[in-house]
Amino acid sequence: MRRRHFLTGAMALAAGPAFARPVMRLHDEPRPMPAPPFVDGAGRNLKLDDFRGRVVLLNIWATWCAPCREEMPTLDALQARLGGPDFHVLPLSIDRAGLEPVRRFYEEIGIRHLDMYLADDLRAMLAFAVVGLPTTILIDRAGLERGRLAGPAEWDSPEAVAQIQSLINERSH
C-alpha cells in the first residue's frame, strides 16, 4: 500500500513540471532564417523579410497531414488572440495542388483569422530543414529563429500564449 502512495505522489510531482514546460524549446542563440519565396492568398510574392518587425510563428503544414489539420484551429485561435502589428501566425502550406485545397480546408473547419500562404513543397522543406509535418518555427522581430517544434501543439494553450507573449514583449535579444 505504501508503495502505491509513493508512486502516485511521484507521478503527481513529475506531471507538475511537465505541464509548466514551455511548448517549444528555445535555442540558446538566435539562428539566421533562410528566405525561400512563397505566395499569399492573393498570389503576391512574399519572403519572411516582409514580416520583419513582428514576431512570427511560421507553421509549415499541408491539408493532407492529419496532425496539421488537428492543430490548425489552435493556430487560428492564437492569431485571433495575439495577431496584430506585433505578432503574426504564418501558416505556410506546401500543398502541391495550390491554394484551392487550402481555401476549401479553411472553409471546412471554420478558419477565420489566418491568412493563406503557399510555398513549393520541396524548396520550403529543404530551406527550413523540415523533417516532418507540422513543423513550427518561432521567429523574432529581427527575423531570427528563436525556437522550433516538429509535431503538433496546442498553440492557444496558456503555456504557448505565455511563451509567445514573452517574445513579443522582448524588444531586443
Image (cartoon, helix red, strand yellow):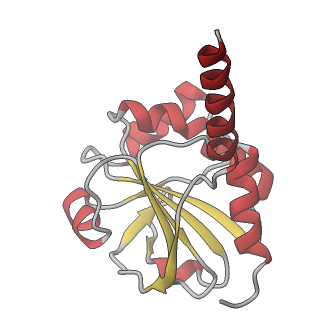
Would you say 16 lies left or right of 52 here?
A: right
- Residue drawn 64% across and 36% down? 15
Q: Is residue 4 above or below residue 151?
A: above
Q: Nearer the viewer, residue 152 or 51?
A: 152
Q: Residue at x 67, y 77 (%)?
A: 54
Q: Quadrant of residue 92?
A: bottom left
Query: Residue 100: horizontal and vertical position, in percent?
Result: 39, 41
> Residue 48, how many percent across, how many down?
48, 77
Q: Nearer the viewer, residue 8 or 40?
A: 8
Vertical placement of residue 7 versus 56, above or below: above
- Number of disc labels: 0
Give the position of the C terminus as an image quadrant: bottom right
Residue 127 sits in which quadrant?
bottom left
Residue 79 in sight: no
Q: Which residue is at a point 48% across and 39% down the rendered structure image?
A: 103
- Is residue 139 toward the left or the right of residue 97 in the image? right
> How far from the left and from the top, in percent, is residue 52?
59, 84
Residue most extreme to the top? 1
Looking at the rendering, in which quadrant would you find the N terminus? top right
Q: Nearer the viewer, residue 123 or 118?
A: 123
Q: Report the side of 169 relative to 21 (left or right).
A: right
Q: Residue at x 61, y 15 (%)?
A: 4
The answer to which quarter of the image holds residue 83 is bottom right
